[in-house]
């Protein structure tokens, strides 16, 4: 491993939103308070220490920032106002940029011009596709599938899904290289990756670690953050599955009865996405919770895109049901011009990628722990045999 110290790392982290790291005097209060820190992962103090010492390569190999769910307890108890919770959040952004081999994540996180420019560029491309390839606009009745043939849109969905999966998976592979391959002394047997894989699925579905962050809250408030977060994640996943996997079932001229799954799944996803995005935006405006006190540009752009996507989707739905052809077609174009950049840019390079990195970090954490346990057992067995 390259152990050279790099004092520029602290300044670099500030570009990703960190504040007050230099005030930390390493008392360890934050780690003692953190509900998710363990002996093997004593964050946030160890992360701050590595930044202060300029240990760039060590920082890149850490899983710790992904194990933090930003409850804010550490920042609330820090005697120096060093904002350790915000450092963990900024380090997650920084790590996202390290995993991303294209360099786009770094550009998007550190430059508003790049981030907003890329969103506008992709949106413009979507509009151009409609200008050149859309079907005829029937105006005597609403015929969305004539204007935007569902099989063509579905092929576009698959291309988009292939694009974002390729970048996200290759970035996850780099995360694996940094945190497991380059950080481990001995190779880890394949069997451990298989036996521990359930952690990946379990934590992706339940977001269970978030739950621990709520434990100190009482009564009705208890588990609110976990519940809201889980609802939001379920909304993303349902919407993504419906768009990429079942578009012909979802975008149809048939108007199904209200109890049909096509309708209530769509309504469920829309409501929780809208609620989650407004809740996040409102929290950032009010700044009452610790995690909302400091907002990076990406923290605003993501919920705004989500709100625009859901509102334009509601408009398409409403106009279609009211049989208003032109408003339906125009709102459909606007809907895709917001949805596509949000998925193409945010899933592999932005905030959505955290949804994948977190469960992978927990999975890698268990893989490492299991490998260490096996190594210790075989060492103990060997030393018993030689006695
Ligand atoms: S961040 Fe604050 S609480 Fe944590 S070690 Fe530094 S000074 Fe102490
Ligand atoms: S924000 Fe919460 S989970 Fe994250 S390091 Fe601080 S105390 Fe731990």
Image (cartoon, rainbow, N blue to C red):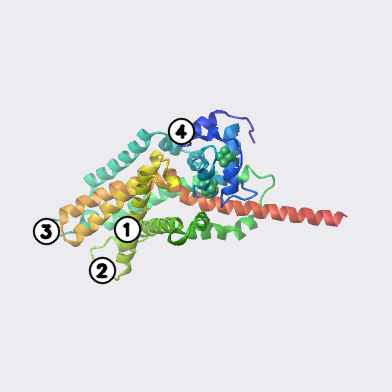
Q: CA distance from mark 4 to mark 3?
A: 54 Å
Rendered-image quadrant of the N terminus:
top right
Query: Visible in this render: residue 164?
Result: yes
Residue position for label 3: 140
Residue position for label 4: 15
State which tag comes first along the sequence, 4 or 1: 4
Q: Quadrant of residue 292?
A: top left
Question: Residue at the location (61% across, 39% down)?
Answer: 27
| Crowd around label 2: few <14 · some 14–19 · many ≥20 (10 Å) | few
| Coordinates of residue 252 in the picture (x, y in percent) | 26, 62
Q: CA distance from mark 4 to mark 1?
A: 33 Å
State which tag comes first along the sequence, 1 or 2: 2
Ligand 1 quadrant? top right
Q: Is mark 3 within 8 Å of ligand 2?
A: no
| Crowd around label 4: few <14 · some 14–19 · many ≥20 (10 Å) | some
State which tag comes first along the sequence, 1 or 3: 3
Most extreme residue toward the left is 140
Q: CA distance from mark 2 to mark 3?
A: 21 Å
Residue 26 or 348: which is nearer the viewer?
26
Q: Quadrant of residue 374?
A: bottom right
> Secondary structure under badge 4?
helix
Residue position for label 1: 270
| Coordinates of residue 141 in the picture (x, y in percent) | 14, 60
| Coordinates of residue 188 in the picture (x, y in percent) | 66, 51
User: Which numbered mark, 2 or 4, is in the foreground of this view?
Assistant: 4
Q: CA distance from mark 1 to mark 3?
A: 29 Å
**Is 251 on the left or on the right of 218, as rendered?**
left
> Secondary structure under badge 3?
loop
Q: Which mark is residue 204?
A: none
Residue position for label 2: 256
Residue 45 or 219: which is nearer the viewer?
219
Q: CA distance from mark 2 to mark 4?
A: 49 Å
């Amino acid at each position: 491993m390259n152990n050279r110290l790099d004092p520029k790392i602290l300044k670099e982290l500030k570009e990703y939103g960190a504040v007050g790291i230099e005030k930390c005097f390493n008392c360890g209060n934050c780690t003692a308070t953190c509900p998710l820190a363990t002996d093997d992962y004593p964050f946030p103090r160890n992360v701050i220490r590595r930044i202060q010492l300029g240990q760039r390569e060590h920082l890149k190999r850490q899983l710790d920032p992904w194990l933090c769910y930003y409850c804010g307890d550490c920042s609330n108890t820090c005697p120096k106002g060093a904002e350790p919770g915000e450092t963990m959040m900024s380090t997650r952004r920084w790590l996202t940029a390290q995993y991303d081999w294209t360099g786009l994540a770094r550009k998007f996180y550190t430059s508003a011009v790049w981030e907003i420019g890329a969103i506008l560029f992709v949106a413009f491309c979507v509009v151009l596709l409609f200008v050149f390839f859309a079907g005829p606009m029937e105006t005597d009745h609403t015929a969305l599938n004539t204007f935007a043939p569902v099989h063509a849109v579905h092929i576009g969905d698959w291309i988009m899904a292939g694009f974002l999966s390729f970048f996200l998976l290759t970035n996850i592979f780099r995360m694996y290289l940094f945190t497991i391959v380059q950080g481990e002394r001995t190779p880890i047997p394949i069997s451990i990756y298989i036996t521990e894989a359930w952690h990946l699925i379990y934590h992706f579905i339940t977001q269970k670690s978030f739950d621990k962050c709520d434990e100190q809250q009482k009564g009705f408030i208890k588990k609110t953050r976990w519940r809201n977060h889980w609802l939001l994640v379920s909304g993303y996943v349902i919407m993504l599955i419906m768009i990429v996997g079942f578009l012909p079932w979802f975008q149809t001229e048939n108007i199904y009865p209200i109890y049909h799954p096509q309708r209530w799944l769509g309504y469920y996803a829309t409501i929780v996405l809208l609620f989650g995005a407004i809740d996040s935006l409102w929290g950032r405006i009010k700044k009452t919770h610790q995690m909302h006190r400091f907002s990076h540009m990406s923290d605003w752009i993501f919920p705004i895109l989500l709100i625009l996507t859901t509102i334009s989707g509601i408009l398409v739905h409403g106009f279609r049901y009211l049989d208003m052809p032109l408003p339906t077609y125009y709102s459909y174009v606007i809907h895709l011009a917001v949805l596509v950049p949000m998925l193409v840019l945010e899933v592999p390079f932005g905030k959505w990628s955290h949804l994948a990195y977190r469960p992978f970090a927990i999975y890698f954490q268990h893989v490492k722990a299991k490998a260490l346990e096996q190594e210790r057992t075989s060492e103990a067995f060997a030393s018993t045999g030689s006695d």
